[in-house]
Image (cartoon, rainbow, N blue to C red):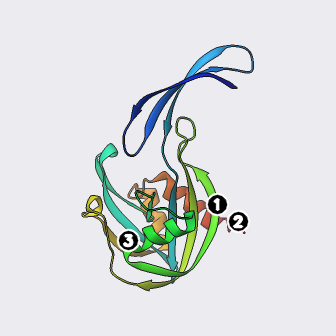
Amino acid sequence: MRTLASEEVYRNHWMSVREDRVMRADGTQGMYGVVDKPGFALAIPYDNGGFWLVEQYRYPVRRRAWEFPQGSWDAASGTPQDLARAELAEETGLVASRVEHLGHLYAAYGFCSQGFDVYLATGLVQGAPAREATESDMEHRFIDEGQFIAWIQSGQIIDAASVAAYSLFRLGCRSG
């Protein structure tokens, strides 16, 4: 597939949207709407047979939901591993002595360029969360792995990134 033209049609601080006119391999032309967002990092805080999760209100789906700590850089910058450590500490207060990369996935590659790195965080030491103003309603809690699975089955965990990250964890994926 080849891009013939690309036009940004919307931009804000967190994302941009563009329309790309494309030529497919068979010679037909088409249009793609693409959301461009910066990548993010997700930490799986694992300890004593369970996980630390955060719960917050997610405006686009109009509900609260549980998920693994995750986020992207705003003003700061660093490596994806730095970001995973920063999000873990910010959202839960946890500091990990070991952070291991499990893989890189894409959030919704049918329309969005955003990817994310998944890290397993172990050797956890509890500290105080340092949440951003947008996370003021956030809570965090430890649940065992059986409860985590039950929460996926019951719809308490609906975050696709968290479910995908758990799959990497369960499959024993290690990227090096």
**Residue 43: x %, y % from top left:** 51, 67
Residue at the image position 44 percent from the left and 62 percent from the top = 76
Disc 1 target residue: 103
Residue at the image position 68 percent from the left and 68 percent from the top = 172
SS at circle 1: strand
Alpha-carbon neighbours of circle 3 within 10 Å: few (<14), some, or many (≥20)?
many
- Indicate which disc, 1 or 2, sits on the residue closer to the N terminus: 1
Callout 3, which amino acid? Glu
Image marks 3 and 2: residues in contact by CB distance under 8 Å: no
Disc 3 target residue: 90
Image marks 1 and 2: residues in contact by CB distance under 8 Å: yes
Where, quadrant-wise, is the C terminus in this rendering? bottom right
Spatial CA span between label 1 and label 2: 6 Å
Q: Nearer the viewer, mark 3 or mark 1?
A: 3
Residue at the image position 38 percent from the left and 74 percent from the top = 92
Q: Nearest the camera: 147 or 14?
A: 14
Q: Which mark is residue 175?
A: 2
- Indicate which disc, 3 or 1, sits on the residue closer to the N terminus: 3
Residue 148 falls left or right of residue 99: left
Callout 1, which amino acid? Gly
